[in-house]
Amino acid sequence: MFFQYLWPQRKLFFCGLIIFITSIHGFTQKKFEVVDSTTFDFGEIEIDIVVNHDFIIRCLDCEEFQVETVRTSCGCTESTWTEKILSNSEKAIIHVTFDAHTLGYFDKKVTVFLKNVHKPIKLSISGWVVN
């Protein structure tokens, strides 16, 4: 009998449940900051020159964090990163290397995946390769 009374209210119940679940999800997301910027412009670089840039990531509200993996958008861009578990006072360094083999403008993407974090951090490098 109680179930029959609640049946017409099911839409309201499920809407409330969805709002509750999404609000909890928002509060549990860890917050990260890329020190300086998520993009770096090398400006003009000569062909066949290798250039590097370090992106620095820190966690704003977690006890510890770890970079799980880093993916680059092409073979001319490579990365290394801090692999150990870091406390919130430590910073992860994402070292990005670009090998300029083709003339013209480049815009390369670097995606950083953190352990137990659903949303990756997106970085990019750009510039012009000249003769």
Image (cartoon, rainbow, N blue to C red):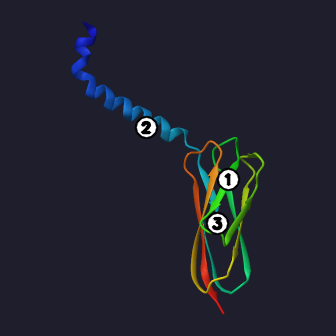
Element assignment for label 2: helix
Please report the residue visible at 67 percent of the width from the left and 53 percent of the height from the top: 69
Q: Quadrant of residue 121?
A: bottom right
Q: Quadrant of residue 14?
A: top left
| Nearer to me, 55 or 102 | 102
Using a 10 Å C-alpha cutoff, classify the residue at mark 3 as few (fewer than 14 neighbours), some (14 to 19) or many (20 or more): few
Give the CA separation, mark 2 to mark 1: 27 Å
Q: Give coordinates of residue 29: x percent, y percent.
A: 55, 43
Name the front one of labels 3 and 2.
2
Relative to 62, does residue 126 appear above or below in the rendering? below
Q: Amino acid at mark 3?
A: Asp
Q: Give coordinates of residue 113: x percent, y percent.
A: 62, 52
| Nearer to me, 7 or 38 | 7
Q: Give coordinates of residue 123: x percent, y percent.
A: 59, 64
| Nearer to me, 107 or 75 | 75
| Nearer to me, 120 or 99 | 99
Give the CA separation, mark 1 to mark 3: 21 Å
Name the front one of labels 1 and 3.
1
Q: Amino acid at mark 2?
A: Thr
Q: Quadrant of residue 51?
A: bottom right
Relative to 16, does residue 34 appear above or below in the rendering? below
Mark closest to the chain's N terminus, 3 or 2: 2
Residue 36, label in figure:
3
Residue ID for mark 1? 69
53 left or right, relative to 110: right
Q: Amino acid at mark 1?
A: Thr
Q: Indicate the quadrant containing the C terminus: top left, top right, bottom left or bottom right.
A: bottom right
Give the CA separation, mark 3 to mark 2: 31 Å
Residue ID for mark 2? 22
Mark closest to the chain's N terminus, 2 or 1: 2
Relative to 71, does residue 114 appear above or below in the rendering? above
Using a 10 Å C-alpha cutoff, classify the residue at mark 2 as few (fewer than 14 neighbours), some (14 to 19) or many (20 or more): few
